[in-house]
Amino acid sequence: AATGVSERALLQLSLGDMANHALILALVLGWVASMRRGSDFRVPTFQFVAVGIVLVAIAAPSGLLLALPAIGNYLDGSVFVTGQLHYVAVGGVLLALLAGLHEAWPQLASRDVHHGRAALALGLFALGTNLAFFPMLAMGVAGVPRPLPMLPVDALNLQAASALGAVLSFAAVALFAWNFVATLVPEEPVPAR
């Protein structure tokens, strides 16, 4: 193989990656089934699950494309790999951490987060994550290499969209943090008139 890895090893890695994505699909189907059974979902938790399903629905197939030997070899040195990795890391891991914090925060702080701010931050996070990383997938399919000394002129608009998405994602994480910190500040009693 051109990468210095045998065809057998590539096939084993591809099958392992596909098995991993099958487990992710089983997890998503479990979420959907529990929502259908009417589990006790608080509003922010349900929203996190819905956004998580959307992000996994993008990250899993792009990971499957990387697992297929012919397509994976084409996409391997491109920005597609970076976009897929960030979809999994930011869209999956960070989203799961924030969802867990929102679920456990009432027990930790003895106060619930503001649901409106949580929904706004989650919407910004979903928009920012997709805007930041989907253009990377598109640039990778177009053949833009991963080490980016200079972007092709055709990719400048996609790069600008990706940068805007990163700013929105950072703003969403700051809003999440503010929402948590705001619950720690005691509320002022309303003076009697």
Image (cartoon, grey):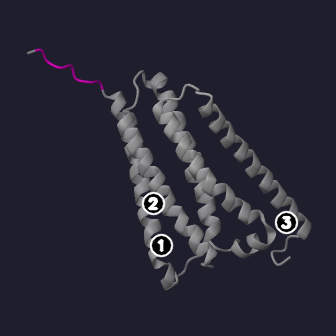
Between 43 and 181, the residue placed more toward the observer is 43
Distance CA(mark 1)–CA(mark 3):
31 Å
Residue underneath mark 3? 10
| Residue drawn at (40%, 59%) of the image | 167
| Residue drawn at (84%, 57%) of the image | 15
Q: Give the SS element for disc 1.
A: helix
Mark 1 crowdedness (10 Å alpha carbons): few <14, some 14-19, many ≥20: some
**Horizontal relation, residue 26 to residue 181: left or right:** right
Q: Is residue 170 magenta?
A: no
**Horizontal relation, residue 176 to residue 92: left or right:** left
Mark 3 or mark 1, which is nearer the start of the sequence? 3
Where residue 145 sits in the image (x, y, percent)? 62, 77
Where residue 155 sits in the image (x, y, percent)? 50, 79
Q: Is residue 39 above or below residue 141?
A: above
Q: Which residues are magenta?
A: 186-192
Q: Is residue 65 above or below residue 115?
A: below
Amino acid bearing label 3: Leu
Q: Is residue 125 above or below residue 68?
A: above
Kindly check if marks 1 and 3 are in contact, taking CB atoms under 8 A apart as contact: no
